[in-house]
Amino acid sequence: MTADLSQLVKAYDVRGVVPDQWDETLAELFGAAFVQVTGADAIVTGHDMRPSSPGLSRAFARGAAARGVDVTEIGLCSTDQLYYASGAFGLAGAMFTASHNPAQYNGIKMCRPGAAPVGQDTGLSEIRELVESWIDSGAPTSDATPGTITQRDTLEGYSAHLRGLVDLTSIRPLKVVVDAGNGMGGHTVPTVFAGLPLTLVPMYFELDGTFPNHEANPLDPANIVDLQKRVREEDADLGIAFDGDADRCFVVDERGEPVSPSAITALVAARELARNGGKGTVIHNLITSWSVPEVVRENGGTPVRTRVGHSFIKAEMATSGAIFGGEHSAHYYFKDFWNADTGMLAALHVLAALGGQEGTLSALVAQYDRYAGSGEINSTVDDQAGRLAAIKATYEGREDITLDELDGLTVTATDWWFNVRPSNTEPLLRLNAEARDEPTMVKVRDEALAIIRG
């Protein structure tokens, strides 16, 4: 096998096709490199339900143990369950998953103790360099006594920790449809929801890393069609869809209509601020709705805007002491969860908010969903920089319009804004637009797309 690590090691994680781009031999080298770069003397590993995950995870453990490191394997788990283990046990960790990618993919999400992320600027580039230097010769022999590899179950502890953060015991009974997409939500949801006043209607809870029903990416509208239909058929109060490794959740209301992740961010932000006496910093990325900073301010908090991407959110949460952070990609981050993202905790907040009052979910979230948004629109372009420059030239100098380049280009007027940012891995520009009403949003969206695709 020829390893092309430039394609395998991404900005935040390792991800590629098995066995074409990586295999257990390479996973073992990653294990050795991970412990050398982090300096860990003990680590925790977990994996999702993909056919290649157990073998890759064990190979990584072998590589770590050979360098004198004790490894705790928690086996099948969601990504946020691995973060729980890292935080609760104070261990560096590695999660084997490719999240929502197709079945032939797999990857590693790595963290330091306390679920602190390992990305390009925090150790991942050094790990890549070590692995590249070892591909032909293998990892250097270690003088250390080999570490142990032991197994530990963390599902009950993870569930108890989450339920200790959100009280659902006194909510009114709710009927909830959950689409696990044959991913790890099928493993975690039954234990987390057990004994709560919830009637659970499970969909695709069978763990199957070949994803026989639909891709485990709920942000793609095609993948929530089954959930929407089932919510209406069951006359349920809401539906929840998880991605493959269950670190993201997507919500639909009692009508089967999608609820904007920005509205969920605003709802959870209001609840977290209430828990903290109406004070605290809340992080949001620059493509979340205007609703989010508005709701944060209305509830006494301080909104902080960041670039798109979990490493930026987590870094800002750590430096600012933020109590919560949300992204429009349906990632939700909590100070009480080691600043890590957990879709399950966000889902519990939604259930608690809905069950704590008598209205419908659509009525509840209406106060948090105030503007017309385009959603993310991708355009294939040959010259990303050139198209961004053309947009800047078009709007620069216009009265009552401001430009900023925190992440791509954001153009803001009194009644609308849009952001265009380049993909790091593909020849794409990503457009998100929002306005105070639908006709204005459509006009702004179409003007921006005409320049992007011009």
Image (tube, rainbow, N blue to C red):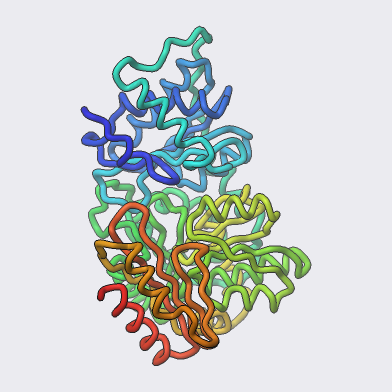
Query: Where does the image place residue 72, in percent across and percent down from the top left?
Result: 52, 28
Q: Is residue 284 left or right of residue 212?
A: right
Please state, as top left, top right, bottom left or bottom right, where the N terminus lies in the image. Answer: top left
Please state, as top left, top right, bottom left or bottom right, where the C terminus lies in the image. Answer: bottom left
Does residue 360 appear in this view?
Answer: no
Who's the residue at 47% across and 85% down the image?
435
Of residues 71 and 331, which is closer to you in this image? 331
Query: Where does the image place residue 149, in percent across and percent down from the top left?
Result: 48, 21
Among all residues in the image, which is located at the extreme right? 277
Query: Where does the image place residue 322, in percent across and percent down from the top left?
Result: 67, 58
On the image, which quarter does residue 17 sit in? Answer: top left
Q: Relative to 150, is 265 above or below?
A: below
Q: Relative to 218, is 363 above or below?
A: below
Of residues 218 and 292, which is closer to you in this image? 292
On the image, which quarter does residue 28 sit in? Answer: top left
Who's the residue at 48% across and 56% down the image?
309
Query: Where does the image place residue 37, in percent across and percent down from the top left?
Result: 52, 27
Of residues 347 and 95, which is closer to you in this image? 95
Among all residues in the image, which is located at the extreme top? 143
Q: Is residue 177 left or right of residue 207?
A: right
Who's the residue at 26% across and 65% down the image?
381
Who's the residue at 33% across and 57% down the image?
216
Does residue 382 appear in this view?
Answer: yes
Say how many tags the image has: 0
